[in-house]
Image (cartoon, rainbow, N blue to C red):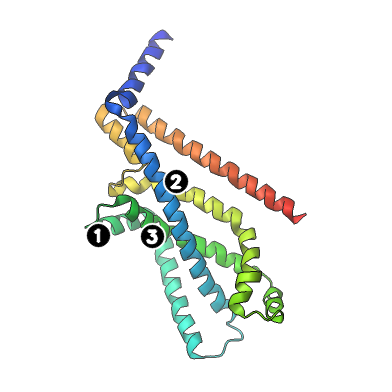
C-alpha cells in the first residue's frame, strides 16, 4: 500500500505539479466553458430563427396565397432545409476542421472559431427541437391570438413561443449537455480545450493514464451538474402544471 501511494504521489507530481502542468488543465477547462457558452448562445439564436421560418412556412401552407412574400419565405425555407441537411448530415469534427483549417485558416483565435463551428452545428439541432415544439401547438392557439388582435408575429411572440419554450426546455438542456461533450474534439483543430490540455501533459510526461482520467472526471462532474439542473428544471415545470 505504501509503495502504491508513493507511486501515485510521484505520478501526480510529475503530471500536474512539475513545471506547473496543472495550468494546461485549468486553461483548457476555461476555454471549454467559453466555447460551450458562446456555442450555446449562437446555436439558440440560429435555432429560433430557422424554427420560426420553417414553422411559419409549414403552418401557413394551406391558407397562404402565392404572393411575392410567400415566395421569399419559400426561398428562405429552402435555404434552411439545406442548412439543416448539411449540418446534421456531416460530422461535427469535419465541420470544425473546415472552419478552422480552411475557411478561417488565417485566424489564430481558436476559441472563437470553435465557438462558431459548434454553434452552427448546435443551431441545426436546436432548430428542429423548437420547430417540433411550435408544430405541436394547436392551431386554436393561433386563432386565439388573432381574435385578440395580434398579427402572426405577435401571436408567436406573446402566445405560442412561451408555451413552446416551456415544452422544449428539457430537450434543449439535454442538447446543451451533448454540446459540452462534443467540444472535446476541438483539439483536432489545435484549439487548446480541456482534452487538448490533457493530451499536452501526456505528450510531455509519456503518461496518458492520469491526465486523461483527470479530464474524464472533470467532464463527468460538469455533465452531472448540468444533468442535476435539468432534473430540477423538469420537476419545477411539472409542479407548475398542477
Labelled pair 2, 3 in contact (Cβ < 8 Å): no
Position of 219 with respect to 95 (left or right) is: right
Q: Cα distance, mark 2 to mark 3?
A: 17 Å
Q: Cα distance, mark 2 to mark 1?
A: 24 Å
Is residue 1 among what the camera can see?
Answer: yes
Q: Residue 87 location, x and y as percent?
A: 41, 63
Residue marked by disc 3: 90
Residue marked by disc 1: 102
Image quadrant in which you'd find residue 122: bottom left
Position of 201 with respect to 8 (left or right) is: left
Secondary element at tag 2 = helix
Q: Earlier in the sequence, mark 2 or mark 3?
A: 3
> Residue at (45%, 72%) from the top-left corner?
80
Identity of the residue furthest to the right in this view: 242
> Residue at (45%, 51%) from the top-left corner?
37
Q: Determine which of the numbered discs, if any, sits on residue 181 in the image.
A: 2
Secondary element at tag 1 = helix
Q: Residue 145 location, x and y as percent?
A: 68, 76
Identity of the residue furthest to the front in this view: 149
Q: Earlier in the sequence, mark 1 or mark 3?
A: 3
Amino acid at each position: 500500500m505504501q509503495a502504491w501511494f508513493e507511486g501515485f504521489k510521484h505520478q501526480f507530481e510529475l503530471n500536474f505539479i512539475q513545471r506547473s502542468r496543472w495550468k494546461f488543465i485549468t486553461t483548457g477547462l476555461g476555454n471549454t466553458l467559453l466555447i460551450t457558452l458562446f456555442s450555446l448562445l449562437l446555436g439558440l439564436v440560429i435555432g429560433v430563427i430557422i424554427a420560426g421560418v420553417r414553422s411559419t412556412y409549414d403552418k401557413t401552407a394551406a391558407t397562404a396565397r402565392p404572393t411575392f412574400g410567400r415566395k421569399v419565405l419559400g426561398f428562405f425555407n429552402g435555404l434552411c432545409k439545406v442548412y439543416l441537411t448539411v449540418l446534421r448530415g456531416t460530422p461535427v469534427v469535419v465541420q470544425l476542421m473546415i472552419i478552422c483549417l480552411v475557411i478561417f485558416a488565417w485566424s489564430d483565435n481558436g476559441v472563437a472559431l470553435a465557438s462558431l463551428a459548434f454553434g452552427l452545428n448546435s443551431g441545426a439541432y436546436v432548430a428542429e427541437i423548437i420547430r417540433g415544439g411550435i408544430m405541436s401547438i394547436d392551431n386554436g392557439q393561433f386563432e386565439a391570438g388573432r381574435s385578440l388582435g395580434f398579427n402572426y408575429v405577435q401571436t408567436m411572440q406573446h402566445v405560442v413561443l412561451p408555451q413552446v419554450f416551456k415544452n422544449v426546455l428539457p430537450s434543449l438542456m439535454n442538447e446543451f449537455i451533448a454540446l459540452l461533450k462534443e467540444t472535446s474534439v476541438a483539439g483536432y483543430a489545435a484549439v487548446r480545450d480541456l482534452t487538448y490540455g490533457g493530451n499536452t501533459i501526456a505528450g510531455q510526461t509519456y503518461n496518458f493514464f492520469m491526465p486523461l482520467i483527470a479530464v474524464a472526471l472533470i467532464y463527468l462532474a460538469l455533465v452531472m451538474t448540468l444533468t442535476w439542473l435539468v432534473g430540477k428544471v423538469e420537476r419545477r415545470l411539472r409542479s407548475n402544471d398542477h
